[in-house]
Amino acid sequence: MKNQTSVFWITFAITLFSVFIGSIAPKALETITGNIQSYISVHFGWYYLLIVTLFVVICLYMIFSPFGKIKLGKPDDKPDFSYSTWFAMLFSAGMGIGLVFYGAAAPLSQFASTPPLADPGSEEALKDAMRITFFHYGIHAWGIYAIVGLILAYFKFRHGAPGLISATLIPLFGDKMKGPWGIIVDVVAVFATIVGVATTLGFGAAQINGGLTYLTGIEEQFWVQLVIIIFVTVLFMISAYTGLSKGIKYLSNANMVLAAILFGIMMILGPTLSIMNSFTDSLGAYIQHLPEESLRLAPHDSQAQQWVLDWTVFFWAWWIAWSPFVGIFIARVSKGRSIREFLSGVLLVPSLVSFLWFAAFGMSAIELQQAGTDIAGLADEQILFGVFDHYPMSLLLSIIAMMLIATFFITSADSATFVLGMQTTGGSLNPNKKVKFTWGVAQSATAAVLLYTGGLQALQNALISAAFPFSFIMVLMVISLFKALKKDRAEIKKQT
């Protein structure tokens, strides 16, 4: 517990210092994070592509190997949540605001503004747009989450280890993880979580502001986004006080209901045949090009390489920065499931739901663009509302969308306060409410400062910078898992 007290205060001090610097010298913080982001992207883009692909390969291997039968828990442990609630919690924690923010913007951008290979607006760009979006939100993203969640759940529920990132490295480093080195590992994980979640909260505040701007004319300004952040912070702290089994469970189910309503209406009002044709064709193209796209860096084409750095490397860094938070959370709600069940559910179900979502909103935006409406000319945070404006019931759709963003905002922040509290109280499954409150305020303050220093670009810069050190910890976690599995092989054979 002494170590985790140190983790709390060290990480809190780093966060407080970052918020302070961002408040008094926003341009300096933007410049520093921008330089770090640029260096990491240029010099380590290959590294991101390799390790994320490795994580996916390991997940697939574990599904089909004898290890897949192992239960994440004791032999008689049963899952705490039904499949529907489990999937809702996975989806809400793992994607949330990002899916709504980029639902129309990402495919439209790949078609009309920044296609990876073809000319903007061309037939080839249209073919690539949905496939590339599927790639960025598919099994690679969920493979990152699944690796962290699997390793944490394995050590926590099978071996009774504390629910800490540092505890998963004990097979490699022994008691060193119970001292200063363990503190360093947990500080890196906690800080990456704060920045990752703060980035997403910043995107959420910006999009709610964008919706208000489009609907009411209220300008997109920092003070409006600050008010949104404060308001939603109050709401998610109320949710956090109700506990995991109540607040997050109910909100996750509410998210899925709102998302299903919004998706269903768009499927009916939008170009339904084009949506389903695009979904089917893009899914096949995604599977066909998956190996090639996973490792495409285009070293001899500077323009194509820059696209990979700006898009693929950014998304991989985003998912890595979120992986301590999402991994710990999905581990917590997955006790009693087998490794095969866990990995299959985490990799496939949210990916397929995401693909359908992007097909519905992406094709609706692209067809408007092809018809002569310049949806791509809008700011990213306004594109979804610009799409709604050209369909019946546009006001209702916009209101539902903003409600969905708000509930995703609350769920993500609520889940994050639980995870941060857990990581700074020795892995407690019921962290102190004061600790959760502190982290809730800290992550909201970080989101506000990042928006203040440079808007969405500052959010992206901070994200890539924070994800980099944690990626090395993830590699060590994988090695530690296989060492533990090798040691447990005899016992595993008896049980399976």
Image: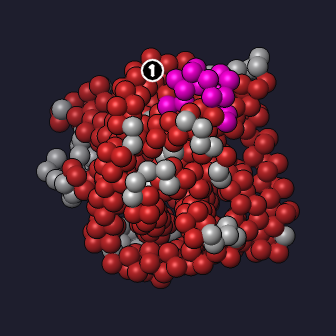
Q: Identify the residue shown where x is 40% and y is 22%.
A: 281
How many numbered tags mark residues here? Answer: 1
- Residue nearer the viewer, 161 or 154: 154
Q: In which quarter of the image is residue 181?
A: bottom right
The image position of residue 143, as x and y in percent, is: 44, 37
Q: In this view, does 382 lie above or below 476?
A: below
| Colour treatment of the image | secondary structure
The image position of residue 222, as x and y in percent, is: 70, 71
Is residue 210 visible in the rendered image? The answer is yes
Give the labeled residue for mark 1.
285
Task: Locate the C terminus and report the quarter of the image it occupies.
Answer: top left
Q: Identify the residue shown where x is 55% and y is 53%.
A: 386
Image-based side of 41 in relation to 358, left or right: right
Image-based side of 463 in relation to 389, left or right: right
Q: Identify the residue shown where x is 84% and y is 70%.
A: 25
- Near mark 1 (Cα within 10 A), the count class, few <14, some 14-19 or many ≥20, is some
- Residue nearer the viewer, 157 or 386: 386
Residue 429 lies in the magenta stretch: no
Q: Is residue 346 above or below residue 43?
A: below
Q: Identify the residue shown where x is 29% and y is 58%.
A: 257
Is residue 482 visible in the rendered image? The answer is no
Q: Is residue 464 above or below residue 307?
A: below
Say what amino acid the circle numbered 1 marks: Ala
SS for callout 1:
helix
Q: Is residue 44 above or below residue 286?
A: below
Q: Give the range drawn in magenta.
A: 113-130
The image position of residue 223, as x and y in percent, is: 68, 76
Residue 125 lies in the magenta stretch: yes
